[in-house]
Amino acid sequence: MPKCTINGKEIEVPQGTTVIEAFKMLGDDICHYCWHPGLSVAGVCRLCMVHIEGMPKLQIACNTEVRDGMVVTNQTDDVKDTVKWGLDFHLINHPLDCPICDQAGECGLQDQYMKFGKYDPEMAEPKVKKHKVVDLGPTVVLDSERCILCSRCVRFTEEVTETNELGIFNRGDRAEIGTVQGRPLDNNYSLNTVDICPVGALTSKDFRFRQRVWYLKDSESICPGCSTGCNVKVYFNEEGLWRVKPRYNAEVNGHWMCDEGRNTYKYVNAAHRLKKVKAGQSGDWSQEEVFPETMKLGEKFRAAAEKNPESIAVLVTGQYTNEEFKNFFEFVADELKVKNIFHWINNPEKFDDFDGLLLRGDKNPNTYGLKEEMKSRGGFKSLEDLQGKMSQFEWVLVLGPENQSQFPDLKEKVDLLSQAKSVIWLSACETPELDALRAPTHQIPMKTYIEKEGSFTNFKGLVQEFKRGTTVIEDALTLQEVVALLRGHELDYRNRPQPIGGTKKNHFTNVRGQL
Amino acid sequence: MSFKVKREPVRSSWYLPGILVGLGFTFKKMLQNLFNQKKMVTLNYPEEKYQYGPRFKGNHVLTVKKDGSLRCTACMLCATNCPADCIRITASEHEDPSVEKFPISYEIDILRCVFCGFCEEACPVDAIRMGPEWQTAALNGSEFTYDIRHLAYRPQLKGGVPSVLDDQERHSAGI
Ligand code: SF4
Ligand code: SF4
Ligand code: SF4
Ligand code: SF4
Ligand code: FES
């Protein structure tokens, strides 16, 4: 293990570590654009200059391996000067249209300029004009003027997705990123190029101009899109959720996530959500208050279960947290002795698919946890048992999927359940498919992954915890709360998390009631 | 220990002279104003209106280009800078790639505005200005939320308030 000195601090690093990685380990600032920990080294931006004792010229830190006894610094005047004018060189043709640039606020150029630049530009020539608003594909827009040609995006399509859509065309100050004609940037990982682009050259069509990034808060979470369980950051403000970005986790997703997973913020927003208990059946729905209605339902449900546990069927999806499952099965399987528990699998033919990178066919974040929980309780009954026997059940309780778009057989299930005597469907979203249920039904509004805390177990058994980020629908319930209400317990509604920016109620409002 | 509260004795109960002096002053001013209107310090509002200086920070104006389209690029710097949090902008993609971004809605809640002028200072393209108008009367609450139609195209802007700026000359000079 070679030892080196960086800015006067000694550090021992594994063999083969580059100088820039050693800087990152120490947490020392170093200017860089083209180096990305998840990609190969290109060494094109020439900003990661360091002074190494014994070498006549400055070296780039990203392509220099640490050797034993190396003494490295980036605090000397000539390093600082080189970096500064290197930055000026990068910005020669940069349009500096930060006001309309989506990257502003999280831009590498802005940050590095404030840290390492702060010069007065000395370029007097007019800027070279390039293409703006170039449509690269279904998800990404390119602004070539802002591109600093770090080649991160090119390396990404070359090394990670191996689809090679992007390339650098032309030479010198006319060089531009582009795609070959008729081959748009169209793969399931394309939006990662937007994340790694250090400037606003690549922007996401979905997020473009929707919000300024400084209005957004973020919260760490786990993507509920598939059983891989990528670590993500969800960005939101009081108006709702706006985007999802990957968060580094070497064991799960590395630096990346798929485009499909980035859509998981959409159904969380209030417009798609169930806000009150919807009681009735197809074409005749009424809105009921959540707490009293669920408690009333609980009484009937428990009475039916006590009379005959066989008259109750439960259909579960792997979309809830471990804690919720534990609580739920303790109530349904242990307490009420219900035996008819069925597992609803989103897409049985493609369930074990894997695209080789991240995305899996199992579109539930917690199938593993669900199976674990059921193991000690004798496992699931086969779904075929349900066909044609629907009418023998008094109640059917469905732990519906929160991400309904991933359940192509939703309509089939709705048709099947329409033959039941009465249905309780727990659902986060309000959809026309659900509203087509022809049996007497209660749709109970549920919280989504960003509104609750707990843990998901991913496909290989890794338990990942996550915290509550924000609250979108105040009255929506977690599965634990549903269980408590079905059991007939009162819930303290006063201490429930409030939506940010929503009606602010303090303790006194709750005590004195509505004025 | 005990404290003694000292009360000033009431010096005089002769308040009548004070009142008469006050009334006398009022009558003097009334007669002065009646016979020498030039010296009057007040204005006969609303017949007469005061003209503030050109730098007065009154109601906002969204400036337009020569072709009448908005200059605003929907960068939201004004909304970010506004201490009263009274500007609301929704941005969208413009068909013209050289414009790229523009506001499809721009609203100022004028009742929350404190007329500090931070918005006009934040604007990088001189798209919002504070004009000389200062009368903000309206008939109902919703009229106090100024939208693009009011901010950029209200009839009052036709005369007097300069609101058309164009960068054509600057651009052709290469600035
Ligand atoms: S890339 Fe960065 S510096 Fe360039 S215009 Fe966008 S925000 Fe400004
Ligand atoms: S588009 Fe972005 S990531 Fe790609 S080369 Fe340009 S600056 Fe780098
Ligand atoms: S004048 Fe001040 S308070 Fe009024 S809109 Fe502008 S920034 Fe906001
Ligand atoms: S600062 Fe100027 S350009 Fe930006 S949104 Fe406000 S008015 Fe429009
Ligand atoms: S980061 Fe080292 S050359 Fe770009």
Image: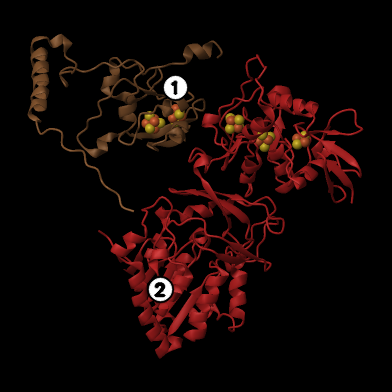
Q: Position of residue A470 (x, y in %)?
A: 48, 55
Q: Helix or strand or loop: what does disc 1 sit on?
A: loop
Residue A247 in view in this figure:
yes
> Hey, what amino acid is under mark 2?
Ile
Give the quadrant of the C terminus of chain A: bottom left
Relative horizontal placement of residue A251, taking residue A487 as reference (left or right):
right
Q: Can you identify the residue that label 2 sits on?
A: A424
Relative horizontal placement of residue A1, taking residue B71 as reference (left or right):
right
**Location of residue A96 (image quadrant):** top right
Q: Quadrant of ligand 3?
A: top left
Q: Can you identify the residue that label 1 sits on?
A: B126
Relative horizontal placement of residue B125, taking residue A156 as reference (left or right):
left
Q: Helix or strand or loop: what does disc 2 sit on?
A: strand
Residue A143 in view in this figure:
no
Q: Which chain is brown?
A: B
Q: Which mark is residue A493?
A: none
**Does residue A39 lie above or below A449 as drawn?**
above
Pointer 2 local density, CA inside 10 Å: few below 14, some 14–19, many at least 20: many
Indicate which label's residue lies in the foreground, 1 or 2.
1
For image coordinates 24% across by 43% down, the residue present is B6
Q: CA distance from mark 1 to mark 2?
A: 58 Å
Q: Mark 1, chain letter? A: B
Q: Nearer the viewer, residue A512 or B127?
A: A512
**CB of mark 2 near ligand 4 (< 8 Å):** no
**CB of mark 1 near ligand 4 (< 8 Å):** yes
Q: Which chain is red?
A: A
Q: Position of residue A338 (x, y in %)?
A: 48, 84
